[in-house]
Amino acid sequence: MIHQVAMNTLITVMFLGLAGCSGMSKETAIGAGAGALGGAVLTGGSTAGTIGGAVVGGAIGHEVGK
């Protein structure tokens, strides 16, 4: 039961996240993805590290794309 709720929540969050990325430039999206991966690796997979890495990477990608 808990596994099913967790999977449904994960799928919903993924779709909402993809909808939020619809207006991003290619550079911003690549930066956010690379930052999320780097943040996850550096913090051992913590959620805060992954999100923080995505934010920083997205900001860098946005500036590079200007």
Image: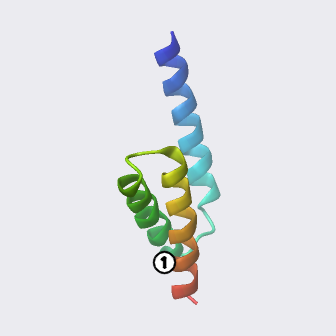
At x 57%, y 30%, the residue is 9
Residue 52 rendering spot, x and y as whole percentages: 55, 59
Residue 33 rendering spot, x and y as whole percentages: 44, 62
Whether 57 is drawn above or below 15: the answer is below
Name the amino acid type tagged 1: Glu
Q: In this view, which residue lies farthest toward the bottom?
A: 66
The quadrant of the image that shows the C terminus is: bottom right
At x 55%, y 69%, the residue is 56
Q: In this view, which residue lies farthest toward the top?
A: 1
At x 44%, y 58%, the residue is 39
Q: Is residue 14 visible?
A: yes
Label 1, secondary structure: give it: helix
Q: Is residue 65 visible?
A: no
Residue 17 rendering spot, x and y as whole percentages: 59, 50
At x 49%, y 17%, the residue is 4
Residue 31 rendering spot, x and y as whole percentages: 47, 71
Q: What residue does disc 1 label? A: 27
Q: Residue 42, located in which quarter of the rendered image?
A: bottom left
